[in-house]
Image: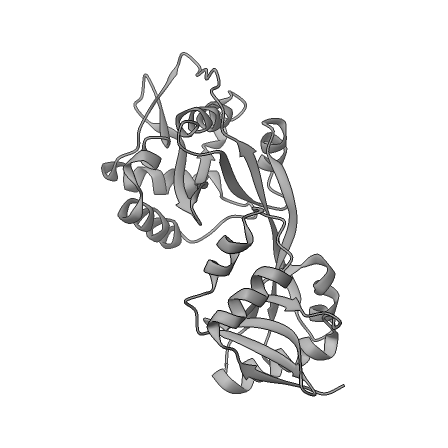
Amino acid sequence: MEYRLVKADRKMFSKYFATYYKNNWFRPSWGDLTKVLSASDDGYWVIAGEDKAAGVYLSDHSIGLVFGIPPYSITTKMIDEMKSYALKSWKLTEDLHAYNVLAEQEIAFRETGFVRVESRQCMMRPTEQLETSMDLNDIYRIPSIDDMSKIVEVFREAYANGPDEREAQVYAEDVARYFDAVDPKLLGASSVVYDRITGEIVGVCLISLWEGLPLVYSIAVLPQHRGMGLATAMLDRALTVLEPDYPVLRLFVTTGNQAEQLYRKRGFLSGGEYHHLRYTIE
């Protein structure tokens, strides 16, 4: 079977994406899913003969959101055609990344030379009025833009040597982006925890909005302050503050992060793993 890629009409692509892309993360309505890519011009069909056999989102020099269209399923040859199209179109000299790869698709990517970088899950839990408790040595307040540099330092130290470690500049850009866009109501569900004696910020939980529902943008506790229930208290506070206006709180967690067990204990449900893979251009 030979395949070729052609640009897709955005409206039709959004309908096919909403219908055929396996999405266990958020369980949104079909109508909401059609809106995810309805304004995007980066959808492509994989054509077999005269049939649409698959869809793929090619954007920012990456492959993503691959879905098969019955009776076709994703094959190694399809992924190889997507990879070749991307490499030729963009004349890439650096790595080609593949995002949101479903577990059942990973072998096809691996057989075309991709290797796994990391796996992530999205977890969710209903919001609820909960009793929140904090160690007597600590106190929480709502984050402010004046806390930005200290929040970045908490992230840098908390994520060091772990699967979510990034350059300090990446944390700084993420925090700046958060304060630039956050809704006051969601900021009100966020927390910084600081030591009552030293005034040092020891924990951070930032709540944002994504696809109409709250998301834990980032959560971190300094290593020397772990095991004291700070992360649990910040999550419980967010769930309580959000409850009157939103039905659910969601978060992403990188597979291998110890926080995954905390989230499960607090009632967060995983929607399954999605993978990030990379093809290195030699």
Q: How is the image coloured?
A: one colour
Q: Quadrant of the N terminus?
A: bottom right
Q: Nearer the viewer, residue 250 or 138?
A: 250
Return the x and y of residue 196 as percentages of the image width and height: 33, 17
Q: Quadrant of the C terminus?
A: bottom right
Residue found at the far left of this picture: 146
- Compared to residue 140, the image places residue 47 above or below, namely below
- Compared to residue 182, the image places residue 22 above or below, namely below
Residue pictured at 39% horizontal, 32% vertical: 245
Residue pictured at 56% horizontal, 84% vertical: 6
215 left or right of 149 in image: right
The reply to whether residue 91 is visible in this rendering is: no
Q: What is the quadrant of residue 103 in the picture?
A: bottom right
Return the x and y of residue 224 as percentages of the image width and height: 48, 27
Residue pictured at 58% horizontal, 72% vertical: 56
User: How many numbered callouts?
Assistant: 0
- Compared to residue 74, the image places residue 150 above or below, namely above
Q: What is the quadrant of residue 85 in the picture?
A: bottom right
- Compared to residue 150, the image places residue 114 above or below, namely below
Q: What is the quadrant of residue 51 in the picture?
A: bottom right
66 left or right of 245 in image: right
The reply to whether residue 8 is visible in this rendering is: yes
Return the x and y of residue 145 as percentages of the image width and height: 24, 39
87 left or right of 134 in image: right
Return the x and y of residue 150 as percentages of the image width and height: 31, 37
